[in-house]
Amino acid sequence: MTERTTGPTTPHDPAVVVVAGALYDRGRLLAARRSAPVELAGRWELPGGKLEPGESPEEALVRELREELGVEVEPGERIPGEWPLKPGYVLRVWTARLLSGEPRPLEDHDALRWLTRSELDSVDWLDQDRPAVAEAARRLPAAPGTGAHG
Ligand SMILES: Nc1nc2c([nH]c(=O)n2[C@H]2C[C@H](O)[C@@H](COP(=O)(O)OP(=O)(O)OP(=O)(O)O)O2)c(=O)[nH]1
């Protein structure tokens, strides 16, 4: 897909909102490795994309995860907070539950991994995503059958 090279042009322009999903399945969180643009390629993120005009964040999330991963998801709660990305862009994160399909890196990504809480540090997250991932991890349901709590 095309990459916008500029964000808002004046300080009064609202930031572009990037909606990303903390997609949970069986006690694991989905991490996606970016394949583009070059400055982000190879680093890991929460899949998602830009909110389009007239769309709710939940609609954007469902659309982006369908396009990028080929799955249907049900958005849950917003994870409180807003994280700055490049100038003029902010990241907001919603939890999401997999309804159908097995995620595949169809667009923007070249690898996916399901991570348990103890595996979260095993991938090289984008720096700007780390606080969001930490918040997402706090909400990670315990893996079934582990007896783990908290
Ligand atoms: N989706 C997503 N993008 C992120 C994260 N962290 C981060 O810096 N970004 C950046 C990468 C991109 O510059 C921008 C989001 O653009 P995108 O390329 O994923 O969104 P999109 O599908 O709507 O874009 P486009 O290709 O249609 O232009 O935010 C993240 O966790 N998730």
Image (spheres, helix red, strand yellow):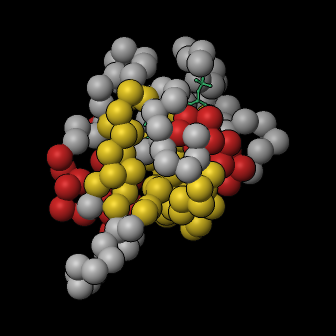
Q: Position of residue 83 (x, y in %)?
A: 44, 47
Q: Is residue 47 shown to the viewer in this render?
A: yes
Residue name at image x 17 percent, y 46 percent = 122
Q: Position of residue 104 (x, y in %)?
A: 47, 38
Q: Is residue 128 shown to the viewer in this render?
A: no
| Total labels drawn | 0
Q: Nearer the viewer, residue 137 or 109?
A: 109
Q: Is 97 positioned to the left or the right of 114 in the image?
A: right
Residue name at image x 56 percent, y 50 percent = 101
Q: Nearer the viewer, residue 123 or 10?
A: 123
Q: Nearer the viewer, residue 99 or 42?
A: 99
Rendered position, 141 above or below 5:
below
Q: Is 138 positioned to the left or the right of 118 in the image?
A: right
Q: Position of residue 110 (x, y in %)?
A: 38, 27
Rendered position, 2 above or below 122:
above
Place residue 37 in its image quadrant.
Answer: top left
Residue name at image x 46 percent, y 56 percent = 22
- The quarter in which the C terminus is drawn is bottom left
Q: Is 113 positioned to the left or the right of 68 in the image?
A: left
Place residue 12 in its image quadrant.
Answer: top right
Place residue 40 in its image quadrant.
Answer: top left
